[in-house]
Image (cartoon, rainbow, N blue to C red):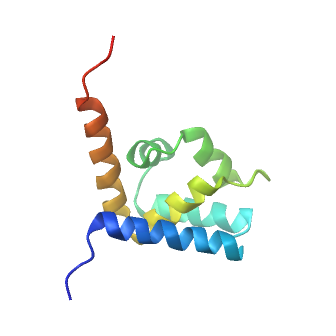
Amino acid sequence: MAEEPLGERLVRLAEEGVEDLKRQRLLPTQEFADQLRELRQRQGLSVEQFSERYGIPTAEIVTAELARGVKPNTKMRLLVEMIKADPQGVANLIASLRNKDNSKPQQH
């Protein structure tokens, strides 16, 4: 069986995340905090490195990991689910998008 193309896989994961939201199966704040911290640490990344690699603002990561009663937004939850499924694929996609943004001519 051929491997699913990265773009299709990420779209599928995002769609599954939306379905999870609809079924309200997303983790409570503390469980999400623990999973996010574990995911980051398992990759051997600091908060700043994780932020840079995946395009999540550092403050959002810190707030989510501390589980300060602020429920992480849907976009962050979906991105974390996609990172859990394919960390390198997501990092590659984000890097590719950044390269495209940086190669666009500047408008004056």
Observer able to see residue 26: no
Q: Is residue 65 above or below residue 108?
A: below
Image quadrant in which you'd find residue 99: top left
Q: Is residue 19 above or below residue 104?
A: below
Count numbered badges in the picture: 0
Residue drawn at x 42%, y 49% is 54
Determine the residue located farthest toward the bottom in the rendered image.
1
Residue drawn at x 56%, y 69% is 17
Position of 42 with respect to 7 (left or right) is: right
Viewer-proximal residue among 73 and 60:
73
Determine the residue located farthest toward the top in the rendered image.
108
Determine the residue located farthest toward the front in the rendered image.
107
Q: Is residue 69 above or below residue 86?
A: above
Image location (x, y in percent) of residue 47: 50, 46
Viewer-proximal residue among 3 and 32:
3
Observer able to see residue 15: yes
Query: Quarter holding the C terminus?
Result: top left
Position of 62 with respect to 98 (left or right) is: right
Residue drawn at x 41%, y 65% is 11
Determine the residue located farthest toward the right in the rendered image.
69
Viewer-proximal residue among 67 and 86:
86
Viewer-proximal residue among 96 and 108:
108
Query: Quarter holding the N terminus?
Result: bottom left
Image location (x, y in percent) of residue 9: 36, 70
Image location (x, y in percent) of residue 93: 31, 53
Image location (x, y in percent) of residue 43: 40, 60
Position of 99 with respect to 19 (left or right) is: left
